[in-house]
Structure formats: structure tokens, C-alpha cells
Amino acid sequence: MQAVTFSIITPVYNTPSDVLSDTITSVLDQTYAAWELLLVDDASTSPAVREVLDKAAAKDSRIRVVARESNGGIVAASNDGLREANGDFVALLDHDDLLTRDALQVVSEALAEDVDYVYSDEDKVDESGRYFDHFEKPDWSPERLRHQMYTGHLSVIRTSLAREVGGFRQEFEGSQDHDLVLRVTEQARRIVHIPEVLYHWRVVPGSAAGDLEAKPYAWAAGRDAVQAHLDRVGIAGTAELGDAPGLYKIRRAANPDRMISVIIPTRGGTGLVWGERRCFVLEAVRSLLAHTSHEKLEIVVVYDIPTPQAVLDELKEIAGEKLVLVPFHGEFNFSKKCNEGFLASTGDIVVLLNDDVEAISDDVLETLVAPLEEPDVGLTGARLLFSDRTLQHAGHVYYKDVIHHSYFMWPDDAFGPFSALRLNREASGLTGACIALRREDYELIGGMAEDLPLSFNDVDFSRKLRHVGYRLVWMWEAALFHFESQTRDPRVKESEVTYLFRRWDTPDRDPYSADGAAGYVW
């Protein structure tokens, strides 16, 4: 690709002169030369601002000042900058923030003919010059973007596309970047994440970088932007405010015409939970039915021959006509039991469920399966908790020949780094204790690998679905307890380890999670 030019759009309003000067200097110091800086003065009342702007424009011909006659807000100023832009790409820079010296150079090296949107990692810098809060962002994660404007800065958009989708919109003032990026990424041919810090948010009094509640109107505007996005792309759901400013929830509607088959391998085992002995499969089925209203449902229980008849009889009482019993002969093989359950099932949607779980959240099945209406979502997984309400599962992390449970044993009330534990998001893998997918995709990838009877079958399952191009989504809003794995012997067969790592390479970094986010290694 030939050299590109960048138009850096910076709306300005009554910025402290020293802060504004530092922002401009960070552009002047760029190692990449093909840029223009559009400083859009939104009718600042401070004479010092105009002095800084005029001085900067006189210093370098690539700096242009666009003076507005009246104060119109950040959307109006940003649109003025977009109209004036001559570059191939526009880069968004706030008037009190800083670019790294190599920011534009690194972005230019990541561009190709089909790249329409680029975003980088970011951090914060305080008034003493201390850098902190490095946000190691995931690669393109559309589900996360619906729940949080995670791409943030540095954002670089092909100029023609930014104009084609209508630029910034007044009704989303305060979350205008989120709205624009949602519309851009709906149309973008290719989206690139650069896993390097190219942008420093300056923490100054009144900035959103230092205080998420500095602009409360922005939260509501972001919710409206997400709702508009859902309506445009045809997702049946309602956007709501999340658990903290800048976070959102989506209440999706599951398709009532879909038959859901829940496949539960079991041998009717019992154990102590909160000081009381229970038969796991009975409580799993009972709690599941209590937390769903979906009518077209079958419960396929694949049971070992030693399973007590009394357990099977009680299952019939609990599930009634929804129950399908499948006897399983031979040595324990979780994968084979799932596959035999699948062959006996009839559902459009298949849910694989361990017998040692208890549903917690309302509409747990509906929440879990609703994203599968999106054709590029191949697998969804639930938020699983140990009995002490610490996390057992918040997605898998794969890198450098290591497999992690991310955020293993973090408290359930934790938000996690950059609120990763309070939103639905893409993950590299999902645990087989509770996952959902379409029937045709189970068949497409050949089901569970029976060469992995005990461990890693869900890792292999996840990798196969990603290999054929699907997104895997961890659903924070679908919550269940998962009891026995907390005390399960974590040792695995050497043959299973060999099988897995011969079949799959792992990248140097997980595309959806920072290395430090994980806390458990198989």
C-alpha cells in the first residue's frame, strides 16, 4: 500500500494553554511526516487558547486552525474537522491528550488496502508524568463494543468511510465516538487492533480519564447509540445502562420457535454442597427448569448404566415429557457421551451442560442461546461460579502453549481489569461445562473429539469453531454455580496433552485477554 496521509481531528475549547501546547507538541514530534492537524476551536472564550493555536499554525504549515463562530459542542466541532480533512485517514485526538512519538508510523505500517478502522492500546498519564492503567485491549470484539466503548484511543478511520456513514451525530453528544465506531465497524471491510500503547489519556481535573462520572450524560447517550446499532443490524434486544458509567447491558430476545436440546452426561453422582448432600443431576435439571420459560425444550440425559434407577425415576418426575434418557455403555468418555446425546437430540440449538451445576440467573437458557441468532457467533458460554461465589469460568485464554481459565477464583463481585467481568465479550475458548451452539455447527466440526475423553475436549471444540471463522462469546449475564470442578483432580493424561498441542498451535498473545488476566493453568 502506498504512503497514506492522516488528518488528526482535535476539537478545542478553553483548554489550559500548557496542556494544549503539550498535545500539539505530541503531534509535531511524530516520526511519520504525512499528517495534518486540524485544531477546531469551538469558540473558546480564553484568549490564551487562540494564542496557542495561532502560534502552532505559524510554526508548521501542516497545522490548520478551524475557527467556529459559536460554541456548538464536540460533535459540531468534530464534524467541522471531518469536513476539512484532506487525509486518507482521520485520527481522533482529544485536546488534552498525547500521542506517542511513533503513533502514526505504527498505524501506517498496519494499514492495507482493505483496512478501514484501526485502534490501539492506551494508558493514562497524570500531572507528574506517571504512566498507569495500561489497557491491553482485545482484538476486534464486537460483543464487547456493544457493552463498552473499549476501542477508544487511538482510533483511526478511513476518511471516506467516516463521511459515508454520516460522521458524528448530535443526538449522541458525549458518546459520539462510540456511535461513530459502531457505524463504521458495521461497514468496515477489515478492522485492525495494534497491541501497543499509542495514546496517553491525560488525567487532568474534570477529564473523563480521571473521573468516569465527569460526564453523566454521556452514559445515557452511549446506551442510545448501542440501541440504534442493535436496530440497524437486526438484533432483537434492548440496550440498558450497565453496572457502572460506560458499561451497558443488552436484553436479547431468544427465538421462541427454536427447539433447545440440553445434553447432560451423568452417572447420578452425589456430593456435599453447602453442608447438604445432593444428587447433582437432579438439582441441575430442577434449577434449569426453574430459571427458563422457554417452551420448546428437551433435556437429554446421557447416563452410565450404574446410575441408580431412583435417580432416573425422579428425573422423569422433574422434567416430564421434556426428558430424553440415553443409556451409555463403556468406559467414561465425556466427549463420547456428549456425541451420543447429540445423536439422540432433535433441537436446533444444542446446550452441553455438566450435571454438577445449578442455574442462578433468570432466563438463563434464553440469555445463553440468544446471540446464536447472529450468524457469525458459533458458541456461547456461561459465567460459572464455585460454591463460595468465586469465578470458575470467565473464558479460556490460550497463548505460548499454555491454557488458562481467565480470572480463576476472582470474587464474583469484582469488575476485573477495565470491567472485563461485568460485560459479555468474545473469548478464545469456553468451558464445556455450559456451552451452546447451533446443531449444524456441531455437525460441521464433527462434535466432541472422542480422543480427548477427560480433558481439553472443550479446548479442542472451541478451537475448531474459531478455525472455521466463528466468534465465541462469554455471557456474563448467564450465571450458574459449578460445584465439583473446584475439588476435581486437575491432572490430565499425557496423551491428551500431546494430542492437543500436536493439533493446535497457540499464539504469543491471546487475542481477547491480557496475559496477566488468567490465574489457573492446566
Image (tube, rainbow, N blue to C red):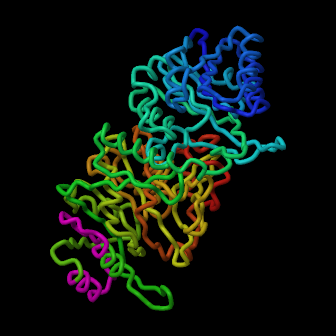
Does residue 442 appear to the left or right of 215 in the view shown? left
Is 290 displayed left or right of 27 in the figure? left
Residue 292 among those drawn in magenta: yes
Q: Quadrant of residue 450?
A: bottom left
Q: Residue furthest bottom?
A: 276
| Residue at the image point whose x is 31% and y is 38% from the top | 233
Whether residue 361 is situated above or below residue 163 in the rendered picture? below
Q: Relative to 129, does residue 490 appear above or below in the rendering?
A: below
Left/right of residue 350 with respect to residue 164 in the rendered view: left
Q: Nearer the viewer, residue 312 or 220?
A: 220
Please provide percent x and percent y for residue 420: 56, 54
Q: Nearer the viewer, residue 391 or 59?
A: 59
**Is 49 situated left or right of 392 in this image?**
right
Residue interval drawn in magenta: 289-317
Q: Position of residue 33 (x, y in %)?
A: 71, 12
**In the rendered view, would you say 194 is above or below 399?**
above
Residue 492 image offset from top left, x and y in percent = 57, 64
Residue lying at the far right of the rendered structure: 128
Q: Nearer the viewer, residue 235 or 479?
A: 235
* Residue at x-position 44% and y-position 29%: 184
Q: Quadrant of residue 35?
A: top right
Q: Quadrant of residue 55?
A: top right
